[in-house]
Amino acid sequence: MLLAGDIGGTKTNLAVFSSEAGWRKPYAEATYSSVNYPDLESLVHEFLAQHDFPIDRASFGVAGPVVAGHATVTNLSWMMDENHLQQALHIPSVRLLNDLDAIAHSV
């Protein structure tokens, strides 16, 4: 299953998708106020605790620059790293993309 996220300085949207249900209809989705969490890991842990799905990959569109697997969210103090997120979230594959790049890939 795929965990997809739109990470912004104001809010973060998360959703879980699977090929079994079709990629356009999420199994679960939620919106969080980003400023209420110290980091992305805390927010994702809360989401996954409420929605117990076996996630094998994650992709996050980030409102800010992403360089060599590292990202900083504009208007938020979160620093993110793909390798760190893989270990902290126990997800085999994690990718960070600039949010505009993520939109372009989806078209």
Image (tube, rainbow, N blue to C red):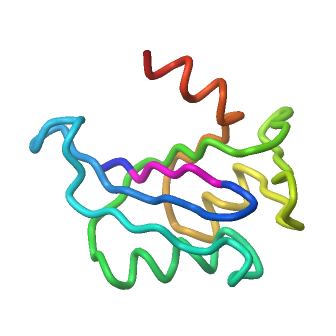
Please give the name of the residue rendered at 22% of the width and 45% of the height, measured from the top-left corner: 18
Question: Left or right: 80 with respect to 26?
Answer: right
Determine the main secondary structure of the stretch shown in magenta.
strand
Residue 92 percent coordinates (x, y): 49, 52
> In the figure, 75 relative to 4: above or below?
below
Q: Nearer the viewer, residue 43 or 33?
A: 33
> Where, quadrant-wise, is the C terminus in this rendering?
top left
Residues drawn in magenta: 3-7
Q: Is residue 61 magenta?
A: no
Q: Residue furthest front?
A: 10
Please give the name of the residue rendered at 10% of the width and 42% of the height, measured from the top-left corner: 20
> In the figure, 52 relative to 31: above or below?
below
Question: Left or right: 82 with respect to 86?
Answer: right
Q: Residue furthest left?
A: 20
Question: Left or right: 28 with respect to 86?
Answer: left
User: How many tags in the picture?
Assistant: 0
Residue 52 percent coordinates (x, y): 28, 76
Residue 99 percent coordinates (x, y): 65, 36
Residue 61 percent coordinates (x, y): 61, 42
For residue 14, which quarter of the picture?
Answer: bottom left
Please give the name of the residue rendered at 89% of the width and 67% of the height, measured from the top-left corner: 77
Q: Nearer the viewer, residue 100 or 83?
A: 100
Question: Left or right: 80 with respect to 88?
Answer: right
> In the figure, 74 relative to 84: above or below?
above
> In the figure, 6 relative to 90: above or below?
above
